[in-house]
Amino acid sequence: MYTLESRVRYSECDKTGKLSLVGAMNYLQDCSSFHSEHIGRGCEALAQEHLAWVLASWQIEVARMPHFNEKITVGTWAYELGGLSASRCFVILDEKSAAVVRADSTWYMVDTKAGKAIRVPESEAAYISDTPRLDMPPMPRHIPATGTPTEAPSITVLQQHLDTNKHVNNAQYVMMAIDALSALGYPFALHRIIVQYRRQAHLDDVIFPRIYQDESGITVSLDSPEHKAYAIVRLEK
């Protein structure tokens, strides 16, 4: 397992003084990026080969969010790699080594020249760890979004939403979903979060959050004007 030691910064906290969900997701993303650099398969190395990893989906379980100034250890490892996808787990541990956040994720490798997913090449075997998958539910193939949705105010993609790939960062979609729920006064709990990414949103694109609620949670579909989802975010109790 590759690990990253840190301390929760004030700028990463929400109004409760605890690490925000987006802050936690940024830690997970940063840890995987540093892991890639550590094994010599970082952004520049992949770019020279016209390759890139793309996050397809993840599920995140929150036991509790660490508070401001709390020391944490972020860990990640790849437990499965082959065919068209790779699977990676994450943990955020507190000072007593208790897992306060756990996550599982699925990734695709993209040929950036051809603009399509490819079979994971043998060069990426360096990611594989002996650490097994976390004891979590299977990654859902489909996020439920049934019934008549409630529409939240539209969101125009700004520079602050983008990352180096020039499209909306993975964590920003989740922030958009949470903002949409807050704008309409929907109560929600951060226990289990499931996200599926469908297509890329770019600068000045307009995103329409559509909210679906059922007995076990809330689904927010972040849609294009043509009702095609950029990302689907589900928050479960």
Image: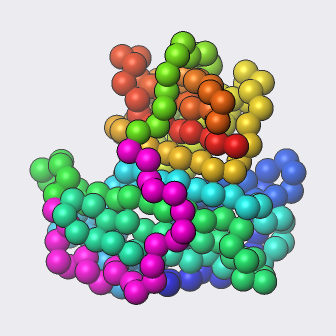
Q: Could you tell whether 178 is left or right of 114 in the image?
A: right
**Magenta span: helix, strand or loop, mainly?**
loop
Q: Residue at coordinates 59% horizontally, 80% vertically from top-left?
A: 4
Q: How many marks?
A: 0
x and y percentages locating residue 189 in the rendered image = 74, 43
Where 36 sits versus 185, above or below? Answer: below
Q: Is residue 23 visible?
A: no
Q: Is residue 123 visible?
A: yes
Q: Which sits in the foreground, 87 or 222?
A: 87
Q: Could you tell whether 43 is left or right of 187 in the image?
A: left
Q: Which image quarter is the C terminus in?
A: top right
The image quarter containing residue 86 is: bottom left
Where 5 sits versus 227, above or below? Answer: below
Residue 124 shown in magenta: yes
Where 153 sits versus 131, above or below? Answer: above
Where 225 sits versus 143, above or below? Answer: above
The image quarter containing residue 55 is: bottom left
Residue extending farthest right: 16
Q: Which residues are magenta?
A: 119-141
Q: Residue at coordinates 34% horizontally, 37% vertically from top-left?
A: 199
Q: Residue at coordinates 54% horizontally, 13% vertically from top-left?
A: 148
x and y percentages locating residue 173 in the rendered image = 53, 41
Residue extending farthest left: 114
Residue 220 shown in magenta: no
x and y percentages locating residue 219 in the rendered image = 57, 32
The image quarter containing residue 224 is: top left
